[in-house]
Image (spheres, rainbow, N blue to C red):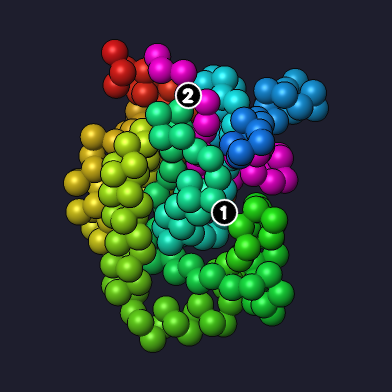
């Protein structure tokens, strides 16, 4: 299997790492190859990760691991967080692997200053030294009013187009990328995008998507919390690893 140096991840709460309060490492730069806390930090190298990206970073033995997934956010944040990282830091295409989970298409994300009164103070995993802007809270009045005025169907088209732009960008950059589904999006504006890039889709077994997988395997946190538990996160990371390996054989 190809030895990647950099693992770059984004998504929603199904990919955010709540155990490590941050992005999980550092990106490659002009002066550093980056870092992966689950390999180099004594505290985290002996603890089990709490997310599939954390487990995957160990399995791939990457030098740099950055996870910019953010709970309660959607595909605009997913697309732009990956774009920002690749454009701001020294990600060499042939050394880099991008894996994301697609979130709900009707989640609308808007950029904002860090001192905005409606800024998301809970879920954005980076700080101002990493990316110079943050996002409004998903439940902010500005977001709720705008979604109502635009309409959910139009929001779904806008956010799905963001993923389309991202995937085309990664293809043009010749960066290896894969994606998982948070839920079944067959009746949403995401479906045409998923179909166009299906060769990059990792369908979990059983269930195909992350919510169904957790329910069918009983590896969710609880019956009232469908996010993956530690065992589920590890099993998903194993499936991702095997899928990527099989694609390269």
Position of the C terminus, as image quadrant, is top left
178 sits to left or right of 26? left
Please state the horizontal and vertical placement of residue 40, each as a whole percent of the image: 72, 24
- Magenta span has 3? yes
**Which residue has dot 1 on it?**
70
User: Does residue 247 show up?
Assistant: yes
- Magenta span has 98? no
> Which span is picked out in magenta?
1-27
- Where 184 sits versus 27, above or below? below
Front residue (pair 134, 87): 87
Please state the horizontal and vertical placement of residue 207, each as a whole percent of the image: 34, 35
- Where 158 sits versus 180, above or below? below
By secondary structure, the bulk of the magenta-drawn segment is best described as loop
**Which residue has dot 2 on it?**
4
Residue at figure coordinates x 43%, y 22% from the top left:
241
- Where 234 sits versus 93, above or below? above
Please state the horizontal and vertical placement of residue 62, each as a whole percent of the image: 56, 24
Q: Residues within 10 Å of mark 2 (few under 14, many from 20)?
A: some
Disc 2 and disc 1: Cα gap in Å? 24 Å
Please state the horizontal and vertical placement of residue 77, each as a whole percent of the image: 48, 59
Q: Secondary structure at mark 1?
A: loop
Residue 198: image quadrant is top left
User: Does residue 55 show up?
Assistant: no
243 sits to left or right of 197? right
Numbered disc in front, either 2 or 1? 2
Sequence-wise, which precedes: disc 2 or disc 1?
A: 2
């Amino acid at each position: 299997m190809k030895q990647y140096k950099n693992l770059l991840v984004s998504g929603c709460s199904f990919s955010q790492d709540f155990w490590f309060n941050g992005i999980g490492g550092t990106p490659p730069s002009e002066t550093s190859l980056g870092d992966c806390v689950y390999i180099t930090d004594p505290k985290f190298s002996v603890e089990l990760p709490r997310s599939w990206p954390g487990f995957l970073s160990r399995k791939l033995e990457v030098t740099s691991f950055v996870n910019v997934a953010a709970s309660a956010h959607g595909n605009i944040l997913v697309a732009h967080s990956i774009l920002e990282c690749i454009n701001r830091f020294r990600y060499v295409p042939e050394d880099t692997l991008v894996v994301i989970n697609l979130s709900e298409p009707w989640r609308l994300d808007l950029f904002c200053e860090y001192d905005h009164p409606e800024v998301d103070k809970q879920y954005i995993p980076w700080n101002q030294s990493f990316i110079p802007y943050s996002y409004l809270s998903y439940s902010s009045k500005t977001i709720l009013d705008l979604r109502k005025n635009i309409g959910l169907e139009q929001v779904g088209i806008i956010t799905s187009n963001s993923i389309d732009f991202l995937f085309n960008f990664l293809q043009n950059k010749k960066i290896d990328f894969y994606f998982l589904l948070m839920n079944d999006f067959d009746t949403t504006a995401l479906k045409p995008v998923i179909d166009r890039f299906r060769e990059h889709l990792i369908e979990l077994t059983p269930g195909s998507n992350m919510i169904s997988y957790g329910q069918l395997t009983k590896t969710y946190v609880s019956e009232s919390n469908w996010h993956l538990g530690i065992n589920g996160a590890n099993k998903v990371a194993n499936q991702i690893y095997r899928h990527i390996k099989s694609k390269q054989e």
